[in-house]
Amino acid sequence: MQTFQMIEAVARAGSMRKAAEDMNITASALVRRINRFEEEFGAELFERLPNGVRLNSAGELLLHHYRATRSDLLRVQGQVADLSGERRGHVSIACSQALLPYFLPQEIARYRADHPGVTFSVHVRDRAQAEQDLASYSSDLALVYEPIYLVDFEVLHVIPQPVHVVMRADHPLASKSEIRLRDCLDLPHIAPSTQFGVRHLLDFAARRGSRRVSPVVETESFDMIRHYVRHENVIGFQIGIGLRDPGDGSLVFRPIAERDLPAGNLILGQMRGRALPVASARFAVQLAASLKDYAAGGIG
């Protein structure tokens, strides 16, 4: 098993030297271990590049098999722990940034209150990366806004999420009862980068009206969007599940009119056909119920 972990570390680092540093072993020891495994396996696993290494086709197949086997082992361990009443396990989830500030911390803490033996890994991913995480067994679950392909994505629950405008209370749009997309595009704005679902919906709707999204600041951080609007009186964009009233009246959140920008979907899913470990399956049931409750209540 340790050899497979080494192979996975090299694949992740893209370099024998960097992987050896990460694992606190010498690069020569790592190279010898992998070379010996390749000889026994009967095939090379890595393509040697001038600036590092990357998995070849044989390496990708082997690593996929290892991750699938590891996942099956965790599932069986969870079932055995259930039989003994220990309730142990590990849950890995890939999620959009919007889930980080409020929704996911609350859900993980609530689950661990009942199952303190369960640990979690939270991987922040954009909509394409989240699906790749499921396919590679890097994550058990994905909770992502507007996933792209949905080929191997088994949908467990869906809730609609309109794109909201985030702005200071003294912004000119804050007093409007309805926010139109054209008004947003006419004013200075900070927007997420193009790999995110919010930006995809904004760009698509803007093109429909022969307009374009032209942010004064573009960022991969939704946390920055929420904070930047306080400093310069611009507007930002985010989905409602990542927003909370700060309680001091300083910020205002308003959905963009649905006739201009239909709501996107926040989707909870897993890899199609995969039998999840017990802890992950139970957490998925809890998430689905909480998402249903959230959809009924809206922004907290």
Image: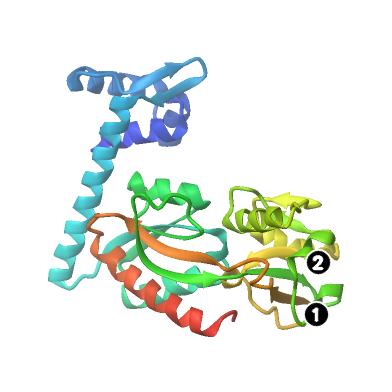
What is the C-alpha distance between the residues marked 2 and 1? 11 Å
Q: What residue appears at the point 52 percent right and 19 percent down from the top-left corner?
A: 51
| Residue type highlighted by circle 1 | Lys
Describe the colour scheme in one phrase.
rainbow
Evaluate if marks 2 and 1 touch, with contact meaning CB atoms under 8 Å apart. yes
How many circles with numbers are drawn on the protein?
2
Residue with the mark numbered 1: 176
Res 171 seen here: no
Dot 1 surroundings within 10 Å: few (below 14), some, or many (20 or more)? few
Image location (x, y in percent) of residue 31:
35, 20
Residue with the mark numbered 2: 183
Q: What residue appears at the point 12 percent right and 70 percent down from the top-left corner?
A: 83
Q: Is residue 82 above or below residue 92?
A: below
Q: Is residue 160 above or below residue 149?
A: below
| Residue type highlighted by circle 2 | Asp
> Is 179 displayed left or right of 142 in the figure?
right
> Is 242 displayed left or right of 251 in the figure?
left
